[in-house]
Amino acid sequence: MKSHFRTIMAWLHTWAGLPCGWLLYLIFLSGSIGYLDTEIDRWMNPHFQIGVHDETADQRAATALARLQERAAGAARWFIVLPTDRNDPLVRILWTPQAEPSGATPRAGSALLDPASGQPLTSQHSLGGQFLYRLHYQLHYLPLPLAYWLVGLCSLAMLVALITGVIVHKKIFVEFFTFRPGKGIRSWLDFHNLLSVSSLPFQLMITYSGLVFFAFTYMPLVVVAHYGLDPAGRDSFASAAFEAGESYPRSGTPHELAPLGPMLRQAEARWGVGRVNGIDIRQPGDADARVLLRPNQDSPLRSTEIMVFDGRNGALLGIRPAVGGVAKAMHDLLLGLHEGLYAGPWLRALYVLSGLAGAGMIASGLILWAEKRRLRVERTSGRAHAGLRLVERLNVGTLLGLPIAIAAYFWANRLLPAGWPPRAAWEGHVLFIVWGLCLLHAAWRPVDRAWREQAWGAALAYAAIPLLNVLTCVRHAPSTWLAGDWVFAGFDLATLAVGLAFAALARRLGRRQPAEGLRA
C-alpha cells in the first residue's frame, strides 16, 4: 500500500512539475535577481549620483512638497516617499486627483525626483531591475489578469511538486549529504535532491506566500460572500485587507499646509533619525488636511504604526497601531517574507542564493526527466518521440537561453542610444528577442552541441560585461573599487563570476563525447 501510494506521488511529482517547469524557471530566476532590483537600477542608471547628497529629511520633504504643489495642486492626496534605505534610493512623489463628478476613478500620477536637481525625471532612461522583478509575476507582454492566473497555476503546481517530492524521498535528509559526481542520471538526481533539501523551507515559504499575494484574485467569491457586492462592503474589505484607514473629507475651506519639519522631527524622536519613509497628505490645502507619517519597514510584518497630524497646525492627533487582527497580521507576515524588503545585506544574499537554488532545482528536474527518457530510448534502440525532442530543446533554449537573454538586457542598457525615446522599452524587447533566438538555435542545432554553444555564449555574455562597462561608462572597474562604489564594483564582479561559472560548465560539456549528452 505504501509503495503504491509513493508511486502515485512520484507520478504526481513529475507531471505537476514538467508542464510548468520552464515558466517556473523564468519566475524563479527573474524573481531571485529581482531581490537585487535596487542595485541593478543603480547600475543601469549610472548618471544618478545616489547617496552623495547630504540632505536632511526636512530638505527632501520640502523639495518634494514644492514639486507636488507645481504638478498636483488641488489633489485629494499627496504622497512622498523619502529615501531611508536601499529600497527607496530616490525621492518619489505620488498624487491622486479629486473624485470625478461622474464617479469615474481619477487617474493617479507619480514621478521620481532627480537627486541632483530635485526636478522630476522627464523620461525613463532604463527599465532597470524593476523590469526583472515585475517579470516574475507580470510576464511582461501578457494582460495582467492572465499573467496572474498563469503564475498562480504554476505556483500551485510547484507547491504540489514540493509536497510530493518530500513524500517520494523517504530518506530526504540522508540524500542531503549524498552527491556522487560522474554517475550520469544518479548524479543529476543527487544534485536535484541537494538543491531541493538545502532550500526546502525557503521554497515552501516563497511558493505559498506567492499564492497568498493574489488570493483575492484567485478567490473573489470568498470576498463577495463575506463583504457583499455593495460599495460599503468593498470599502470595508479594503479597510480590513489593505489598511485603507479612515477617510478624511474635504471641508472646502482653504488653508495653508503646516510646515512638515516639526512633524518629521516628532516622528524621528519616536522611530529614530532617518526612518520616516512615507508622508501621506490627505486633502492638502484644506482646513481639514491630515498628514500621516510612516517609518520604513524593518521586519517581515508589512504593517507599521502611523502618526497622524493635523495639517492645519501640525498638532499630533494620534498614533495608529501597526497591526489589526490576527488574520491581517498573518497575511502581512507572509507577504513581507515573500518581498524581503526588511532584509539586510546578508539575509538578502541568502534570499538570492535560495531563489537561485530553486531555479537550479527546477532546471535539474527538467534535465533529469529528459535524460531518463533518452537513456530508455537508447537502450531499446528506438527513436526519441516528439515530446522528448521538444523537452530537450526547450531545456537548452530556456535553461541557458534565458540567462543569455538577461545578459543581453544588460548589454542593451549600455549600447542603446541614450537619447532614443523608446530605449527603455527596447531593453525589454531585446531580452525576449535574444531568448527567442536561443530557442531557435536549440531547435536547429543537435542537442549536445546546442548545450555547449549556448554555455559558451552565456560565459562570453556575462564575462564581457565589465569590459563593456569600461568602454561605455565612466563608472567602471577599477575606479569604482578604489572609490568604494560597491554597487558598481559588485555588479562587475558578480557578472564576471557568473561568466566564469558558465565557462566551467562549457568546458565540462566539451570534454564529453557527443553521444553522452549531459550524462557523463
Image (cartoon, rainbow, N blue to C red):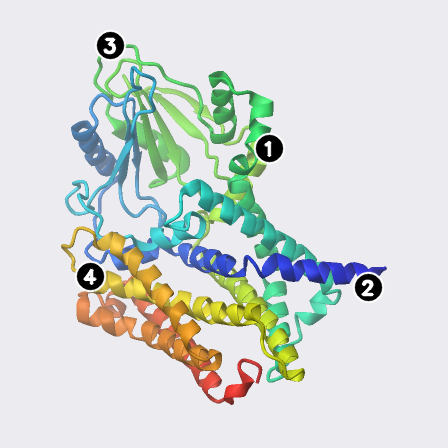
Label 4 residue SS: loop
Residue drawn at x 28%, y 30% as measured from the top left: 95
Asked whether the beta carbons under mark 1 and mark 3 sit within 8 Å of each other, the answer is no
Q: In the drawing, what numbered circle is on residue 416?
A: 4
Asked whether the beta carbons under mark 3 and mark 2 sit within 8 Å of each other, the answer is no
Residue 278 in the image: state x and y as whole percent: 35, 35
Find the residue positioned furthest to the right. 1
Q: In the drawing, what numbered circle is on residue 456?
A: none
Residue highlighted by disc 1: 327
Residue drawn at x 58%, y 29% as measured from the top left: 221
- 385 on left or right of 472: right
Residue 220 in the image: state x and y as whole percent: 55, 31
Q: Nearer the viewer, mark 3 or mark 2?
A: 2
Residue highlighted by disc 2: 3
Residue highlighted by disc 3: 253
Q: CA distance from mark 2 to mark 4?
A: 58 Å
Front residue of 57/488: it is 488
The disc labelled 4 sits on which kind of residue?
Answer: Leu
The disc labelled 3 sits on which kind of residue?
Answer: Thr
Front residue of 8/203: it is 8
Mark 3 or mark 4: which comes first in sequence? Answer: 3
Q: Nearer the viewer, mark 3 or mark 4?
A: 4
Sort mark 4 into few (<14), some (14-19) or many (20+) by Cα contacts within 10 Å.
Answer: some
The disc labelled 1 sits on which kind of residue?
Answer: Ala
Q: Nearer the viewer, mark 1 or mark 4?
A: 4
Q: CA distance from mark 3 to mark 4?
A: 51 Å
Residue drawn at x 26%, y 30% as measured from the top left: 261
Label 3 residue SS: loop
Label 1 residue SS: helix
Q: CA distance from mark 1 to mark 2?
A: 39 Å
Residue 133 in the image: state x and y as whole percent: 40, 52
